[in-house]
Amino acid sequence: GEPRDRLKQGEWVGVEGVKTARGGDGDGAFRAQWGALKLSNEILLPLVGIGVGNLQHERIGWAIERSLPLGVRIIDTAHASRNERVISQALAKASGTIAPGEAMTVVTKVWYTHLGYNRTILSVRESLDELTSSSPEPSPNIIILLHWPRCDPRIAPWMRCEVEESELSEDIQRAGPPPHLTPELSWKESWRALEDLYDQGIVHGIGVSNFNAQDMRDLVKNVARIQPHLYQGNIWSMLFDQELMTLLKDNEIAFQAYNVMNGVLAERQLKQCPNAVLELWNLGQELSSSTYSSSEARMAMGDNIAGLEEKQSILPSQVVLRWLSQQQVGSIPRAATLAHLHANSPRFIEHIRELSPEQMGRADTAIRALIRGEDISGKHTHGVSATFTNWKRDAVRLFWVNEAEDNEEIIVAERISSGNSIGIQTFKGHKFVARPIVEDGSEPAQPNHSRDTLEFEVSSEPGNPQSFHIRDDL
């Protein structure tokens, strides 16, 4: 491999005091209290956090400041996102929110341009310098992952190996050969660099992200002197890559899922799999009454419970996070809005009643269907069969109002011609709007909500039908 510049103990200002845990009872990655996942090195990793890697820099401070009172104690980012200094500033500003003795954890990653021993050392140096630049108290636990095993446009077309290499600083280029020229060696040298960092107590944990089963087998069987503590991957891998998940479990490597909401509840999936979405709403309603009647939950949720009680249903996103947590799978949903922060926060998810084995199975079936884009049968869902009939002269377009996403409007019927009807499965409390389509197929540029937009709300109980008439005299 390439020549290595060996590390000196505590050579980086601000990180020499970091300690890693050793030993323990050997129960490994899958023994934990609720709310925290015990890694194989005995570090407790919060199950639910937030991801800020793709968040606009000006919103990161806002997200961190508002998420800490909601129980968030883990932040996920990447060195390639160039926001580690912003995170440090936000943590320093909000440090009074964290009680004495509580730990804050930041997970960051080494980009594929920095693979190779010395390049990885420089990347981690930069990350730690940035994350400690504002001296946040308490100093966060820092876990370093390899973001990708290699740059390979066949894996991801957006990867630009030669272009990104040419854009690196001379210091990085001089530190080691271009990793895309030695793709099977570079990540192995990077892993050895992470092992040395961990040995010297400079980081609290090490791991990988986006490694396939073959690369993971090579890592755990042939390369690693220290096994990864954490694997970060998409939710598809958790459900459909059994070989990978078996490797992780056998080697006590914890799994943390990213891109959960976009992977399960994106607009495309909501359109393709209405019955699966409805099943998650059903589960949310089943869980709601006992969750919101709990005095502990009411105290934990505080003023935020009032709006949720009006809806009388735990949201599909919350069902997904609770389902993951019960399997000791971590998650780092991105926090784009205040509503998301509240709904997907540890404080809320922790107090949702535990799903029964039967409910876990139903959630599993619905989530698998959503990820595959293949809907489940509607016969087992207990929603409302709603019929919309258009009595207007013009054709209309029908939208579902997704209150969980700041009233985002999602098309459920591209066109209902005059005199025609459509039937859909929906849920009590769901809202819809219908708007006329002008001759060119578009909607009115600025619809008058009192005249052009018609609003509907489902009021029937589950299992009962309801008819809606789209007409001008409503």
Image: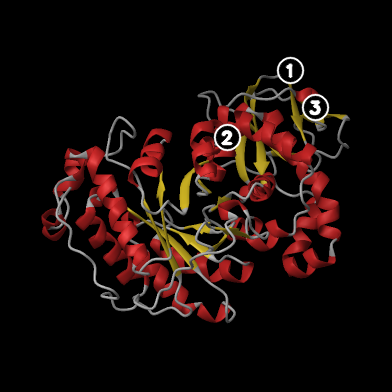
Q: Earlier in the sequence, mark 1 or mark 3?
A: 3
The disc labelled 1 sits on which kind of residue? Gly
Who's the residue at 67% across and 35% down the image? 364
Q: Earlier in the sequence, mark 2 or mark 1?
A: 2
> Few, some or many C-alpha atoms within 10 Å of disc 3 (few <14, some 14-19, many ≥20)?
few
Q: Quadrant of residue 466?
A: top right
Who's the residue at 22% across and 50% down the image? 116
Query: Separation of disc 1 and disc 3 at Cα?
Result: 31 Å
Q: Position of residue 350 (x, y in %)?
A: 70, 59
Q: Position of residue 96 (x, y in %)?
A: 54, 82
Q: Is residue 348 above or below residue 265?
A: below
Q: Which mark is residue 299?
A: none
Frontmost residue, 185 versus 263: 185
Q: Label 1: which residue?
A: 419
In the picture provided, is 213 more to the left or to the right than 347?
A: left
Query: Separation of disc 2 and disc 3 at Cα?
Result: 22 Å
Q: In front: mark 2 or mark 3?
A: 2
Who's the residue at 38% across and 78% down the image? 17
Q: Are marks 1 and 3 in contact (CB under 8 Å)?
A: no
Q: Is residue 14 above or below residue 123?
A: below
Frontmost residue, 319 versus 110: 110
Q: Label 3: which residue?
A: 380
The disc labelled 3 sits on which kind of residue? His
